[in-house]
Image (cartoon, rainbow, N blue to C red):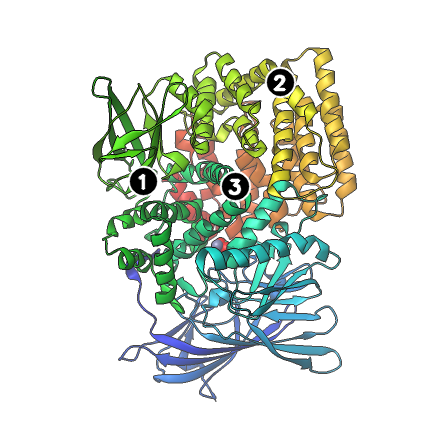
Amino acid sequence: ARPIRLTDYRAPAYRVSATDLTFRLDPTETRVTTRLSFERLGESPAPLVLLGERVKLISIKLDGADLSPDTYEITPETLTLRDVPAQFVLETEVEINPQDNKTLEGLYMSSGRYCTQCEAEGFRKITYFPDRPDVLSKYTVRVEAPKIGFPHLLSNGNLIEYGDLDDTHHYAVWQDPFNKPSYLFALVAGELDVLEDTFTTSSGRTVDLKIYVDTGMSARAAYAMDALKRSMAWDESAYGREYDLDLFMIVAVRDFNFGAMENKGLNIFNASLLLADPTTATDADYERIESVIAHEYFHNWSGNRVTCRDWFQLCLKEGLTVFRDQGFSSDQRGHAVQRIKDVKALRARQFPEDAGPLAHPVRPSSYLKIDNFYTATIYEKGAEIVGMLKTVMGPKVYRTALDHYFATHDGTAATLEDFLKSFEAVTGNDVSNWLNWYTQAGTPRLKITQTYDAAAKSLTLSLSQSTAPTPSQPTKAAVPIPVRLGILSEDGTPQSFGFEGQSQIEITYVLDQPFAAITLTDVAAAPVLSALRHFSAPVILEVEEPQSHLFARFKGDTDPFNRWEAAQKLAQNLILTGGDVAPYAEALKATLLDDALEPAFKALIMALPTEQGLAQEMSPVDPAAIHTRRKAVKAELSRALYPTLRDLYDAIQPPTTFSPDAQSAGGRALRNALLDLIMAGYGTADAAHQSELSALASAHYARADNMTDMIAALTALMSVHGEPYEAALDAFYARFKDEPLVIDKWFALQAACPHPETLARIERLSRHPDFDPKVPNRWRALVQNLASNNPAVFHGVFASDSYGYGFVVDQILTVDEFNPMTAARLVESLSGYKRYASPYREAMKAALESIMATPKLSKNVAELTAKALD
Ligand code: HT7
Ligand code: ZN
């Protein structure tokens, strides 16, 4: 297949001034009538090329006259009319089969309801259309369906008419007053319960809010509704963005390839990211629901009002919207804790992507399937770039530039250059060097060397940056790297210093060249550098310094991010290079006993680096060594700190009533982190202590009145394994067997258990009557958890002949037959094979080769597998 290239972009030859759609819904024979008013944009005549896949053309008319088949050409992906006037109306009728559509793109059925997913290229599975984001038009949509089974008929915009067609069928007509690209079209029809509320905007308009869910589930949408209202208020105060329709709807569906979708006025959500109550959702679920509700809502401006010219500009809406939702979460839940969580996610998902064969720039230059580019690089690294711009420009200039961007490009399809130009327009400065962040793949390394001159009381910092070659980008230019920094004394006390003639406590220096040196003056004593505070840039920082400096930052850095970072580095050194655990345990104890620190922060600082994170620091990667050494260090820490951990654990009384707010969640996070570290001592404890620990974990399970504590207890029981673990799992299943979202957790938990029996258990679970690879949530719970969250079992560290790779390959190939987009996401788990030691490297490569050798692979899986093997 031929790649699509950014350099091949051409403006559309025709604009569509109006799109009128009529759907006669039927599970296997839905009829879609499409009436499009076209106007030629260029001077000279050009063929009209419409895109359509798996649509059966029934009739076609131009300006009311039937077209004979010799006037148009149909391929499996296009409908071309060579000879058309400068202005005309084209009317087509097509037939589609929603019930058979297991790709979950276009119009499909989920739990007996009709729903759509059109981003990125799903609209072409509904009808023939110029399905590209720079063709915007006003939509009127008529939906016809049986009354029984389909009482709700929803689409974008405002409901302008509805009524009965006859005794059995009814219809609704929706009109969206805003121009939109086809990827933002949505339709939902079915039996649903609705939770209703209103929001009054800053200009005093009342917006009706409706969340549609499975019947009987509306109470579980209350948290999402609350998060939506907080998001609407936040976007007004933080960005001056007001909602623009009188109605905002969200629908939850069970079968969905992604988290959620920002269709204009009719967001569609994966039910797992919308429904929550304390007995079924964890604090992590509540947190994610809050952020995804915000994310999709914020797209109304960053994505919908200003959309993308082409899919290469995807991060224009995604990077910016992630940055906006992170800002919201940070205001709701605390800046330090949120930043640590965001950076953990960036390092866990984006850094490996940037370091492997699938590395691509935030704005890629070519693709086979755009679905393969909904990646951590485009989302999370894209957000980091916006964050760096804000850091460098300052919050006021940032806000003015964003106002300028929204005002200038409202109602249009924009580019990254347009976004950067808004910063130029308000500052008058050239910001073109920021484009390198968008066009270059790879994580830059920032090296800092320090020279302290005690006599002159000056500290000279030499800063250099470099980025390793990535596929098809052998050389790299310098990027602007904002480095926030301060200094401490050896005992951890913050120190002021002079910089460019001013006394400072912290500065942000922008390194925009390969090398630079700066001098801090009036540095009273041998300093401890605290660089890249708040993780001011998505880079890998290398500073040569003694361990004592890490301890100083761990104990006293006023920047909580760097305090956490120092603790992680120390733990990483202990695991990867060994050493005495005692000083680290002492520092951790002091942190845990510090009443000034938030519980959520303490929970984060207690968690050792993950095996996947440690793998990024080892070359070649030996997953068995990582697993064994991490487990040993954790057990030793557990032993060293047991009395403290136990006292702290016993002192926390869980509240009698549940609240999902950040403070309560932080309390639970700390208590569960304490339990986790306590249980790490199980394997090396004597029999008496083992039975005490087993009883503790079982009691935690028995007393749990919310899903967070239940999952923590089940995880704790993994260390005990055997009867107590099995009994708890069985009890959990029996209690929640009719709750699909909780049964997803039951599958996920077992798939993530680092135990020699797990692979056999996963294989058994794949034959469980509740396992269905056609339901992405269930499939991801089992398969993705093995591949991404259970490195020990995935890499077969317990028994050298049983890697998890074969199981994952079989699953990729099974799902690729009907849902290529979801299947392809799992290829990434094998793609880093070159970094692994033998025999893992050969076995992972063989697994990829077996995928490649399979006939009839989808474009999605073929593109990623070929790149992974390149
Ligand atoms: N903008 C949405 C992306 C999305 C998507 C992409 C490909 C296939 C299915 C999909 N569903 C949703 C989600 C978002 O970033 O807000
Ligand atoms: Zn998004």
State yes or no: Cβ of the residue under disc 3 lies below 8 Å from any atom of ligand 2: no
Whole-percent x and y of residue 852? Answer: 45, 43
Whole-percent x and y of residue 76? Answer: 46, 66
Q: Is residue 249 above or below residue 471?
A: below
- Identify the element where label 1 is drawn: strand
Label 3 packing within 10 angstroms: few (<14), some (14-19), many (20+): some
- Nearest to viewer (mark 1 / mark 3): 3
Residue shown at 57%/27% (left/top)?
595
Q: Tell me which amino acid carries mark 1.
A: Pro
Locate residue 210 relative to residue 498 in the image: left or right: right
Nearer to us in this view, 746 or 292: 292
Locate residue 45 relative to residue 660 in the image: left or right: left
Q: Tell me which amino acid carries mark 2.
A: Thr
Label 1 packing within 10 angstroms: few (<14), some (14-19), many (20+): many
- Asked if labels 2 and 3 touch by Cβ distance under 8 angstroms, the answer is no
Nearer to us in this view, 424 or 206: 206
Quadrant of the rendered structure where residue 659 is?
top right
Residue 279 visible (yes or no):
yes
Q: Is residue 328 above or below residue 208?
A: above
Residue position for label 3: 334
Q: Is residue 163 above or below residue 500?
A: below
Q: CA distance from mark 1 to mark 2?
A: 40 Å
- Identify the element where label 2 is drawn: helix
Whole-percent x and y of residue 862? Answer: 44, 48
Quadrant of the rendered structure where residue 743 is?
top right
The label number, if any, that marks residue 644 in the structure image: 2
Quadrant that contains the N terminus: bottom left
Residue shown at 38%/61% (left/top)?
403
